Image: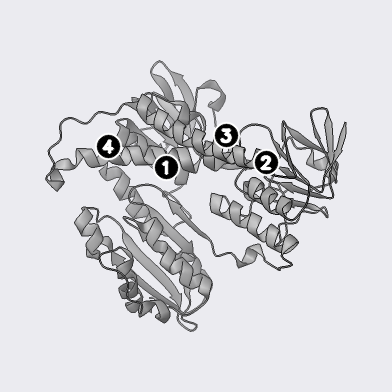
Amino acid sequence: MTRPFDAIVIGAGQAGPSLAGRLTASGLTVALVERKFFGGTCVNTGCMPTKTLVASAYAAHLARRGAEYGIVTGPVAVDMKRVKARADAVTATARANLERWARGMDRLTVFDGHARFEGPDRVRVADTLLTAPRIFVNVGGRASIPDMPGVGTVDYLTNTSILGLDTVPRHLVVVGGSYIGLEFAQMYRRFGAQVTVVEKGERLVAREDEDVSDAIRTILTEEGIAVRTGATCIGFRPHPEGVTVDVDCTSGEPSVTGSHLLLAVGRRPNTDDLGLESAGVAVDAKGFITVDDTLATSVPGIWALGDCNGRGAFTHTAYNDYEIVAANLLDHAARRVSERIPGYALYIDPPLGRVGLTEAQARRTGRPLLVSRRPMTQVGRAIERGETKGFMKVVADADTKRILGAAILGTSGDEAIHGLLDIMNADVDYTRLQWAVPIHPTVSELIPTLLGDLKPAL
C-alpha cells in the first residue's frame, strides 16, 4: 500500500512532534513514524528519568547532612525500588501525554514501526510505503560501546540499561569521566554504592577549563568517589564478584574490581539502519547526517534534526533545530544553526552551568580578553544553603565588551547561567548587565559584581 503525504517526520523525539504540530497547523498532511517510544532520549532514558534520580540522590545526601542544619534525623536508608518507581512514573506520564497529544492532531497519521528510505521521497514502514516531498529525520542516538579489550566478555550497563536497576550496586565502576558518567557516579554514591570513575584522559570533563575539571574532581572525591584519570590500559575481565577493569599500566593499582560496570564513553547516532544510502543522504565518518546551516541534508527536501545531525547533543538544541526548520519553511525566516550560542549543564551537585567559549577556547582566538572569577563562598545564597562548593567565571572581549563565555559551578548554577546567556543573545556589552539590580538573596546577584571585577587576562 502507498500513502502520500505532504511531509514525513521520522522519530518522535524532542523535535519531531513539535515540528509535526507546526506543519499540520499550516494545513499540511503529515506522517509521523516512531519505532519504539514517544519522547526520544530525553523523556525515556535521558533528562527526565536521570534528573528524577538525581533529585532522589540529593534528598538522601541532604538527609545525611541534617545535623548541619539543626535537623535531627535517624539512619538514612535508600529504597531503590521506590526510587526507580518514581523515575519510571515521571517518564511514563511524560511519554503518555506526548503520545496522546500527537495521536490527537488533525491531519497527522502516526505509524508505529521502523522507517527505512527507499528513495529521496519514499519511506517504508512494514508493508506501507509513505511518500512526501519533505522528509524530516529526528532519530536521536544511543550509547557507544567502546572497542576495548574484553568488552565482549563481561556484562555491562549503559545509560539506558542502568535505569532498570532497582537495587544499589555494591561497587559501580564507571568508565568515562564526562557528563553522563559523572552524573551516575555521584548519584549512585549518594544511594550508597562504592563508586570508581575510570577516565582515559588526564582529567575529567576535558572539554572544560582545567580549573573547572579540578573543582569537579574535588567535589566528587570529597564524597568518597575514587577517580582514576590517565587510565592508559583500559580492559575488562570477568570476575566472580562482577567485573575487573584494567586501568593503568604505569602507576597506581593496575585494576579495580566492581559488582557492576557502566560504560559512558560517548554517543552514536541511530542512522545505521535507516537506508539513508537509498536516498543519497550523506553521513560523516561517525554516522552523523551531514547538514548545512539550515539543517538541510545533501538531498533537497530532506532535513535532519536533533542528535543524529551532530550539531548538538542536547534536548534544547534538538528543540531549537525544530524552531529553525519551522521558521525557515513556514515563516519565511532565515534562521541558522551558527547563530545559536551554545549553553548546557552538567547535573552533578552542585551543577555546572556553561555558555559560550571556555577560557582556553577564548585565549586561542587571540583576542584581548577580560577575565573574572569568584568563589561560591562569597555568594550569600550558597552560604545560607550550606552549599558553597564551586565558583563563577566569565570571559569577555576587551575591545567589544561582549561576553564570550562563562561557567557557574555552584548551587543553582544551571539557572543563574541564563542571565549571562541572555545578555549574549541580546548582543550587548556586559556593562548593561553590570548595572542591573538583581534580587537579593540569589545566586544571580553576584553576577554584576563578577562583571565589575573583569580584568585583563594574564
Closer to the chain start, of discs 1 and 4, is 1
> Marks 3 and 2: in contact by CB < 8 Å?
no
Closer to the chain start, of discs 3 and 4, is 4
Q: CA distance from mark 2 to mark 3?
A: 23 Å
Location of mark 3 (residue): 145
> Marks 1 and 2: in contact by CB < 8 Å?
no
> Marks 4 and 3: in contact by CB < 8 Å?
no
Location of mark 2 (residue): 11
Determine the secondary structure under disc 1. helix
Which of the 4 image quadrants contains residue 253? top left
Residue furthest out toward the top: 240
Q: Please identify, in this view, whether the residue under mark 1 or under mark 3 is nearer the observer.
A: 1
User: Tag 4: residue type?
Assistant: Ala
Residue 168 visible in the shown view: no
Determine the secondary structure under disc 4. helix
Q: CA distance from mark 3 to mark 4?
A: 31 Å
* 320 left or right of 86 in image: right
